[in-house]
């Protein structure tokens, strides 16, 4: 299965409230609470649609976050334009002949406010999996550089407490003068829960809006 895993919100929600607001300090995972004071890497959370670029046996196919997800036709055309000429290069970068590139399809007409990012539609990389291995952040950037792909920007480092405080203040997007959707936080080194799920947290600015 190459579907991308769910990214956990950092805190649980009050399901009895009208807005289902976050309960500050009520962590969704015990691992988040335990590691909250450690240094995490923060990337900007892009408001788009999840895209998988699947490279296998020299061929390239595209998918959404799930097998049933539909990709907009305009974005499919852009993905074909961007990736099909890279088949040979992908074979050089991934010598074992298989990898999945995970990214966000973003831009105009993709989500409300997508035009703030760009007037057209494109793909920005945020994760790479080779076999059962997730690449470290530096290696994801290396893959992006070799393939000529945009990659989600690293916007800082700090504790999960720092990330929450930043989201409460509001975060300006790297793409322009508008509020970023939020932060995706990852430990400086890949870590998993006891059940084998990756530790990746999302902190959305709108969850802390007054």
Image (cartoon, helix red, strand yellow):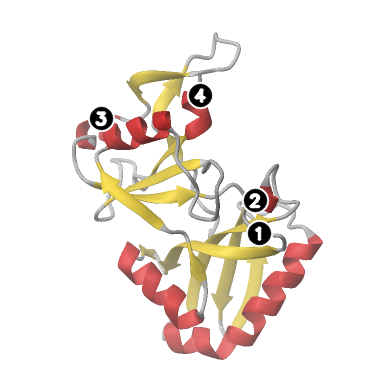
Q: Earlier in the sequence, mark 1 or mark 4?
A: 1
Residue of label 4 = 209
Residue of label 3 = 33
Asked if residue 169 lies left or right of residue 57, the reply is left
Query: How far across and how far down the image is residue 187, in percent?
Result: 27, 49
Mark 3 is surrounded, within 10 Å at the Cα level, by few (under 14), some (14 to 19) or many (20 or more) other residues, namely some
How far is disc 3 from disc 2 in space, using C-alphas? Answer: 34 Å
Mark 4 is surrounded, within 10 Å at the Cα level, by few (under 14), some (14 to 19) or many (20 or more) other residues, namely few
Q: Earlier in the sequence, mark 1 or mark 3?
A: 3
Residue of label 1 = 118
Per the image, label 3 sits on a secondary structure element best described as helix
How far is disc 3 from disc 4 in space, using C-alphas? Answer: 22 Å
Front position in the image: 104 or 120 = 120
Query: How far across and how far down the image is residue 182, in percent?
Result: 47, 41
How far is disc 1 from disc 2 in space, using C-alphas? Answer: 6 Å
Q: Earlier in the sequence, mark 3 or mark 4?
A: 3
Instruction: Say if 111 sits above or below 170 in the image.
Output: below
The residue most toward the front is 177
How far is disc 1 from disc 4 in space, using C-alphas? Answer: 25 Å
Residue of label 2 = 116
Q: Earlier in the sequence, mark 4 or mark 2?
A: 2
Q: Residue at x 32, y 20 (%)?
A: 25
Front position in the image: 2 or 174 = 174
How far is disc 1 from disc 3 in space, using C-alphas? Answer: 36 Å
């Amino acid at each position: 299965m190459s579907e991308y895993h769910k990214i956990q919100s950092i805190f649980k929600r009050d399901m009895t409230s009208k807005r289902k607001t976050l309960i500050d300090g009520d962590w969704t995972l015990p691992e988040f609470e335990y590691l909250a004071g450690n240094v995490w890497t923060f990337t900007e959370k892009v408001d788009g649609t999840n895209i998988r670029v699947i490279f296998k046996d020299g061929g390239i196919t595209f998918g959404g976050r799930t097998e049933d997800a539909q990709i907009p036709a305009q974005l499919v055309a852009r993905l074909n334009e961007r990736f099909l000429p890279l088949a040979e290069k992908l074979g050089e970068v991934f010598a074992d002949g298989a990898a999945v590139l995970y990214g966000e399809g973003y831009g105009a007409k993709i989500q409300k406010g997508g035009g703030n990012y760009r007037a057209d539609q494109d793909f920005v990389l945020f994760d790479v999996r080779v076999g059962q291995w997730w690449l470290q952040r530096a290696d994801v950037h290396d893959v992006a550089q070799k393939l000529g792909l945009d990659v989600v920007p690293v916007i800082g480092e700090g504790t999960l407490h720092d990330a929450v405080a930043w989201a409460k203040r509001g975060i300006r997007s790297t793409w322009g003068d508008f509020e970023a959707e939020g932060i995706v936080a990852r430990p400086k080194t890949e870590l998993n829960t006891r059940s084998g799920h990756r530790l990746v947290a999302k902190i959305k600015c709108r969850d802390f809006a007054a």
